[in-house]
Each structure stands twice: as C-alpha cells, then as structure tokens.
Image (spheres, rainbow, N blue to C red):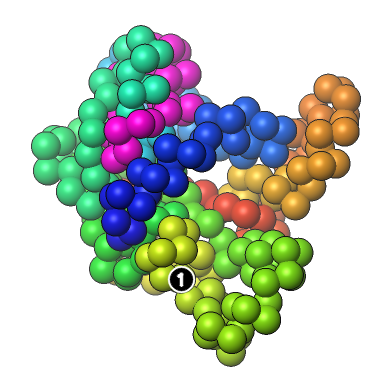
C-alpha cells in the first residue's frame, strides 16, 4: 500500500468531493447509486426496515456516498484513512458513524454484520496482490452471508490511453519499463494509483471465494469526454446519464472506461 503520508499529501490537495460533483463524476455517482439502491430494495423486499439496513463505506473519502445514504435513513458506518477527508465528512454533521481506519485491518468492526459494503477507493491505492486480497477478505468478513460488496477499480486501458497517449508520456513510460509487452501497467507505490484488467479482478475474486453478481462500468466514456459533457445543457446531460445507465452492464464495454464496479455476493 502507498505510504499513508503520500496518500494524505495527495488527498490534502485533491478534491474528491469536487470530482464527484463534476459532470463526469456525476455520471459515475449516478450509476453507482442506482445499483446500490437496487440491492437496498432487495433488502426491503425481505422485510428489513431502512434503519436496520447496515451499510459500511470503506475508504469513504469526504462522504459523497455515505452521507446521502445516511440521509435516506440507513445505518451507515464510514471508515476513512485520511484525516483531512475524515474531518470534512464529520463536519457535515450527518448520522454517519465515521471513524479513521485502514481497509487492510477492520478488526474493530463486527463480522457478518453489514448488508451492503462499499470498497470504492482503497483498491486504487493497493499495489501488491497480497494487500488486495487482504482488503477483499476484510470486506468479505464483515459482510453478512448473502450481503453484497461493491468494489471499484481503476482500469488499465484508461490509464494507458489517457496518460501514455493523450498526455504523450509513452516514451518516458516505455523507457522506465512501466508497461509490460502487452501494455499492462506496472505501477509503483510512488505512482499512487494501481491499474487493473478484468482478468486481474477475476483472479482476486476466485482467491477470496467471492461470487460475482454483476460487473458494471459506472462512468463509461465520461472521463474521456469531460470537456464535451461540460458543454451539454441539462436536458442533453440527462440523456447522457440515461445512456450510461442503459449500457453500463454491456460486457463489450467493461474495462474501457476509467472505472469498473464489481458487485459481489458473499
């Protein structure tokens, strides 16, 4: 895992709240929340009251997901590594039970307790296979049998297309041996972000004994289209949100966007 000081320094400058409030961030948020609500509705159909639907947000950032979910009446716990982000989250004065913690060690949280577990940030910053297994295993441990775990990843092809070609760093990257022969990113801790392909995700799930419910692309082409999305009027942008929801499960598009969200059943 990237050193805490490096992650803290990054998030002290990087405004995650602003990113998810941007047009391309709203696409990701809107799509992800749709699927979170789908599973919450399954809990309701089983007769679970809203206040008894337990949600854990691991790597909660400033509470972009946990605060709205708490405001809807669910029992939400948020775990965040970075003190700066945690301070912003707590300042919102929501009902979220917010605490500092690490995705690799959730020993203070009860086993088999949460109906919905969100792992939306930590996997971006875990570089070893062993640490990724630890994070997934901890999320599995605290989730109820039959509960759902939402895991977000940053995708390899997005990193290669954007950084290597769009921003024209390809020569430097090749000279520093940061791509394999088949153009898989070789990330180092100092790079802060790790990039994966679908086969990497599948291997993690298999080793952790987790079954996929579905995998989606929450943002699709949105990150590539930032400047164009910003030019759309509200009606046009709503059509784009609808378009993304209609295609986010298409397997021929999974892995092409900036992120994927893997939806797993314990």
Asked whether residue 123 appears in the rendered view, the answer is yes
94 in relation to 260, above or below: above
Is residue 28 left or right of 86 when viewed as pictured?
right
Residue 14's x, y, as percent?
51, 40
Is residue 43 left or right of 102 when viewed as pictured?
right
Is residue 241 left or right of 140 when viewed as pictured?
right
Which is nearer the eye, 25 or 207?
Answer: 25
50 in relation to 41, above or below: above
Which is nearer the eye, 253 or 259?
Answer: 259
Determine the image quadrant of residue 45.
top left
Residue 133's x, y, as percent?
28, 63
Residue 108's x, y, as percent?
11, 37
Q: Is residue 74 magenta?
A: yes
Name the residue located 53 percent from the left edge and 34 percent from the top edge.
15
The image quadrant where one finds the N terminus is bottom left
Q: Is residue 198 magenta?
A: no
Name the residue located 32 percent from the left edge and 69 percent from the top edge.
128
* SS class, disc 1: loop
Asked whether residue 251 appears in the rendered view, the answer is no
Name the residue located 49 percent from the left edge and 72 percent from the top edge.
199
Which is nearer the eye, 155 or 82?
Answer: 82
User: Which range of residues does the magenta coloring cover?
Assistant: 62-85
Which residue in the structure is indicated by mark 1? 187
């Amino acid at each position: 895992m990237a050193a805490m000081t490096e992650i803290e320094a990054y998030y002290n400058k990087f405004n995650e709240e602003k990113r998810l409030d941007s047009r391309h961030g709203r696409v990701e948020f809107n799509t992800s929340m749709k699927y979170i609500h789908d599973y919450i509705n399954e809990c309701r159909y089983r007769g679970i009251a809203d206040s008894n639907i337990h949600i854990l947000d691991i790597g909660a950032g400033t509470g972009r997901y946990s605060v709205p979910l708490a405001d809807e009446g669910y029992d939400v716990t948020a775990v965040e590594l970075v003190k700066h982000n945690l301070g912003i989250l707590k300042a919102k004065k929501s009902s979220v039970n917010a605490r500092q913690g690490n995705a690799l060690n959730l020993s203070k949280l009860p086993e088999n307790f949460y109906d919905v577990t969100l792992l939306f940030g930590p996997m971006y910053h875990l570089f070893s296979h062993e640490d990724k297994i630890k994070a997934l295993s901890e999320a599995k441990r605290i989730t109820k049998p039959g509960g759902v775990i939402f895991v977000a990843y940053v995708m390899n092809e997005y990193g290669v297309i954007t950084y290597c070609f769009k921003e024209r760093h390809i020569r430097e990257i090749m000279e520093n041996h940061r791509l394999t022969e088949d153009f898989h990113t070789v990330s180092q801790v100092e790079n802060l972000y790790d990039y994966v392909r679908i086969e990497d995700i599948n291997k993690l799930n298999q080793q952790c004994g987790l079954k996929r419910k579905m995998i989606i692309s929450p943002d699709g082409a949105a990150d590539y289209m930032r400047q164009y999305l910003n030019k759309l009027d509200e009606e046009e942008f709503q059509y784009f949100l609808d378009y993304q929801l209609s295609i986010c499960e298409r397997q021929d598009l999974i892995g092409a966007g900036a992120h994927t969200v893997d939806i797993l059943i314990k």
